[in-house]
């Protein structure tokens, strides 16, 4: 399966996917990495592993639709069947969703439906929860609300800051994102309404 | 510390508190169990352990305020310093909150802030989460939203129904509710805004 990874930043979850492919855990190929930021370190990571990595400048395109059409061209040119969002800081619009419905995954640093949106780890700390975590989910037309594939808990410690909690959540993200992608690649997920059943 | 437990149903969390006192884990006394339902099995449980158990009929009192004044009388008569809600199906009003601010605890079968309100386990199943759990929190003037003392995760299994998930969450409720009460009794909780810090 040909995968596209959309990034905006350092791309540590991209690295986790690359590592899981290189180790043989994941039988798939990243055929393109696309960034909306020219200086995203994720682009350098991709290049280091000989992966096709491109910057698509949203400022040069007049609208979200035109921007996503440009991304679609890159996806089609690279025969991508699955899109992974990995720290990609834009909301997916109708253009991409229409073409890749049920084939876009995201990872979010919270136990959704709690703490959707930006700065989820800080939201968790500020709310005073004792358990946090991360979620891999299908992307739908509402922010961080699509059907959930995998979740993992992380205990909040007494002396946690946003940063220390984020670091411990990230360790779990790096585990469950490849696991979730593997389930998709192996066609082991079945939808029942908004529930995602995992076939053994 | 003299504790009141407010119930409406079978009172399995009441039983967990009773057991933790009888085993010596919790150094406290349940001085009264109050039910808003005459036929609550929790009243029988209390009586079996020689605990003062009373039914206060909300229908005989004209308003929530008058009902809570009646409960307050029972609390004062029994020198209660702490109130535990254990499957008590009424929202605590200003009258009780005013007199017992920061001294009312509730247990909720979800990882709050997710799935507040009724049928939390069914909400979790319907949402398709992969991780559920339970929360002990201080009661404030908003439903299931007060400062969180303890939380515990429970994995959702592929074949879980509302009932099987509720049963596994309940096992954890029976562990964390006595633990949370012990922290209160031992004066080991400190408030920082809405965060609850646990002193070692």
Image: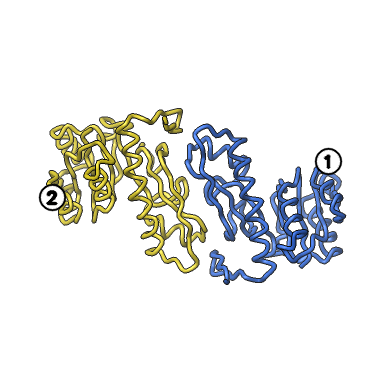
Chain colours: A blue, B yellow
Vertical side of B85 occupied by A69: above or below: below
Foreground of the two, A57 or A172: A172
Q: Which residue is mark 2?
A: B47
Residue visible at 55% across and 45% down? A115
Vertical side of B181 occupied by B119: above or below: below
| Helix, strand or loop under label 1 | loop
Q: Which residue is mark 1?
A: A39
Q: In the image, is A131 to the left or to the right of B29?
A: right
Q: Position of residue B147 (x, y in %)?
A: 41, 36
Nearest to the eye among marks 2 and 1: give it: 2
| Residue A182 position by quadrant | bottom right
Vertical side of B108 occupied by B156: above or below: below
Quadrant in the picture for the C terminus of chain B? top left
Q: Position of residue B96 (x, y in %)?
A: 25, 35
Residue visible at 46% across and 51% down? B153
CA neighbours of label 2 inside 10 A, class few (<14), some (14 to 19), many (20+): few
| Residue B120 position by quadrant | bottom left
Q: Position of residue B161 (x, y in %)?
A: 42, 66
Numbered mark located on residue B80 in the image: none
Chain identity of mark 1: A
| Helix, strand or loop under label 2 | helix
Residue visible at 82% across and 57% down? A32
């Amino acid at each position: 399966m040909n995968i596209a990874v959309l990034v905006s930043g350092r791309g540590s979850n991209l690295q986790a996917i690359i590592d899981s492919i290189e180790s043989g855990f994941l039988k798939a190929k990243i055929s393109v990495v696309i960034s909306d930021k020219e200086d995203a370190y994720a682009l350098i990571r991709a290049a280091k592993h000989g992966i096709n990595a491109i910057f698509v400048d949203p400022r040069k395109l007049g609208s979200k639709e035109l921007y996503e059409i440009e991304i679609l061209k890159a996806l089609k040119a690279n025969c991508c069947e699955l899109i992974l969002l990995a720290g990609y800081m834009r909301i997916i619009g109708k253009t991409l969703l229409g073409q890749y419905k049920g084939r876009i995954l995201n990872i979010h640093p919270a136990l959704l439906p709690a703490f959707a949106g930006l700065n989820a780890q800080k939201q968790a700390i500020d709310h005073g929860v004792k358990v946090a975590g991360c979620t891999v989910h299908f992307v739908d037309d509402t922010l961080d609300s699509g059907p959930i594939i995998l979740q993992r808990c992380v205990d909040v410690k007494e002396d946690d800051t946003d940063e220390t909690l984020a670091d411990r959540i990230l360790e779990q993200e790096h585990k469950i994102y490849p696991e979730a992608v593997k389930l998709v690649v192996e066609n082991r997920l079945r939808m029942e309404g908004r529930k995602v059943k995992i076939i053994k």
